[in-house]
Image (cartoon, grey):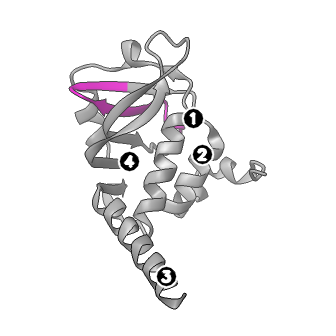
Amino acid sequence: MRLAVALAVLIGANALALAAADVDIHAVRDNRTVAIGNSVSSVEKLIVLVQSCSVDSTPYVVSSTTWAQTAASGSFIHAVFSEARLVQLPSRDNRGREQRHVHEILLPLPEGRWPDHIFVRSGGDTLSVTKYDPLALRDLVSEVDPALLTVEPYKALLALPRKQ
């Protein structure tokens, strides 16, 4: 029995290590790197946020410079997957949802306003999605950069009801 428990713990720890090695996630705020305590949980919360989006805004937002401009903004969360992850996104015609192989996610975190769009790289395409669940944003920000919850408008996320 003890051997079975020890093996289960070892397998679980190895699975978490592999999951963490599978992705590089980092956060930057005011051009300074923010230490992320639990990268596996943070990646899961970032994916939940992306999957909560209900609108594909790519045709209206994405240009050839969008990704570079967002990455140069000085405040963002960026995840790069060593192997593409299947993520549910709004369909291109916004009439449903579709699974896409996502290689990167880039969430801008502007001060003084909400992130308008979340960017993903799928294959060779940069996509933009929006209309996300604010509870998912709160859960992600509370874990990755709780200090952001002290400034407007992110401070308002603290007043939202807790999930049941």
Instruction: Give the residue displayed 41% in from the left and 41% down from the top.
Output: 107
- Residue named by callout 1: 52
- The quarter of the picture where the N terminus appears is bottom right
Q: Amino acid at mark 2?
A: Ala
Comparing labels 1 and 4, the label whose residue is closer to the camera:
1
Total count of labels: 4
Distance from label 1 to label 3 (Cα)?
Answer: 38 Å
Comparing labels 4 and 2, the label whose residue is closer to the camera:
2
Disc with the residue nearer the chain's start (2 vs 1): 1
Disc with the residue nearer the chain's start (4 vs 2): 4
- Residue named by callout 2: 136
148, above or below 115, in the image: below
Q: Position of residue 83 (x, y in %)?
A: 26, 45
Q: Position of residue 125 (x, y in %)?
A: 26, 24
Instruction: Give the residue displayed 47% in from the left and 27% down from the top.
Output: 89
Q: Amino acid at mark 1?
A: Ser
- Residue named by callout 4: 76
Q: Amino acid at mark 3?
A: Ala
Disc with the residue nearer the chain's start (1 vs 4): 1
Question: Are the residues tagged 4 and 2 within 8 Å (C-beta)?
Answer: no
Extent of the magenta region? 112-127
Disc with the residue nearer the chain's start (1 vs 3): 3
Distance from label 3 to label 2 (Cα)?
Answer: 36 Å
Comparing labels 3 and 2, the label whose residue is closer to the camera:
3
Q: Amino acid at mark 4?
A: Phe
- Residue named by callout 3: 4
Question: Are the residues tagged 2 and 1 within 8 Å (C-beta)?
Answer: yes
